[in-house]
Amino acid sequence: MTRSPPKAAASPRNATPTLTRASRRSPGSLTQVAGIEVGHFTDPRRPTGCTVIVARGGAVGGVDVRGAAPGTRETDLLQPGNLVEQVHAIVLAGGSAWGLDAAGGAMRWLEEQRIGFDVGVGIVPIVPAAVLFDLAVGDARIRPDAEAGYRACAAASHKRPAEGNVGAGAGAAVGKLFGLHRAMKGGLGTASVTLAGVTVGALIACNALGDVINPDTGRVIAGARTANGRALLDSRRAILRGEPLKPLLAGTNTTIGVIATDAVISKTQAQKLAQLAHDGLARSINPVHTMFDGDTLFALGTGQSGKTLGMMVLGTMAAEATARAVVRAVQAARGISIGALSLPAAAELAARQPRTPGQPS
């Protein structure tokens, strides 16, 4: 298990917490957040799967949907004005709308563990979910189901989650504006930031229509490729110079994820944290929140640190962790070839490019 970053000491001159050196060096993970477990199920028959984020003790939940083509379940109950205060798991899945079946399996596992909302006559686990479209990669008849959700829950632990071609990111691809044949492999990534004894983590399944950007350098690191497939195109610049786009089908993309913190937050603040985390998507994906993406972020607050840093700091941490997790998703991915479709990974394409001395990645 990855060690938790050391806590930052507050400066005597300024009470605002500062990022520890360990936090800068290590990407961290969502499971650095106390009270959060993560489990994956990856279908060996084709690249698809689901990822379950479990909060055994319950967590205050929020959500923010920015993409115009979402596939979701039980997001209405997370609105601040609605009754339910806590959720017990979040499911992220491939398989488009079919993948929402995985949440049923997660509910069954949680019920068996006596984790859920006691309604007097039984236990009802609260399990919101979101899906991404990966049906064009491999056999579309194979998609996550209730058994997949159950097995992901059974695999959940506090260990650092696997990244790349796993769980909800198994069949993900990025950079599809000029056709899937010029896209690259997406995936699943995680990161966290710790300040003054409070951690905010993110886990992102990146299946974006747009390119993935390194927010520290502004360079495209994965996305649409040139016509010969040997180099990155830079979709933003290509659009602005008038290159024609391929016809697009709504909902065939989508970046989904979970942001969690051990800070004490309210349901209203959880919703705001989900909103602020989308800033991290905007820094690391371009274009993002399109009519053809269903970009959805959930936020969870376990409160187990017993502390809060205020929404200004927590929101900044959430956006930072989200952006880092997106980058991790494509950095950890591995290229795949299925029939005539080939989706190289960022690391593989970068290895083919001539490197200028001193050039940032």
Image: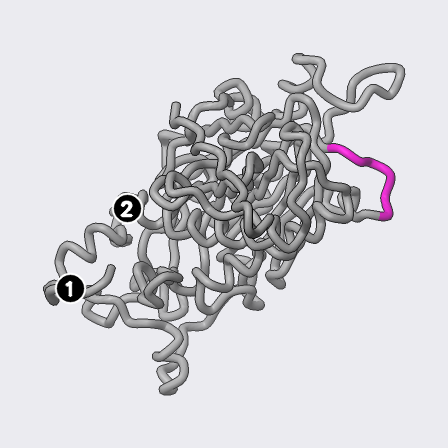
Q: In what element is the residue under mark 2?
A: strand
List the residue tagged with mark 2. 338
Residue 9 pos. (x, y %): 50, 38
In the image, 294 versus 66, the foreground residue is: 66
Query: In which quadrant will I find the C terminus?
Result: bottom left
List the residue tagged with mark 1. 358
The magenta-colored residue range is: 81-86
Question: Residue 187's quadrant in the figure?
Answer: top left
Residue 194 pos. (x, y %): 50, 40
Q: Residues within 10 Å of mark 2 (few under 14, many from 20)?
A: few
Among all residues in the image, which is located at the extreme bottom?
A: 241
Query: Is 232 above or below relative to 24?
Result: below
Point 56% across, 64% down: residue: 289
Residue 95 pos. (x, y %): 51, 43
Point 82% across, 36% down: residue: 84
In the image, 91 versus 329, the foreground residue is: 329
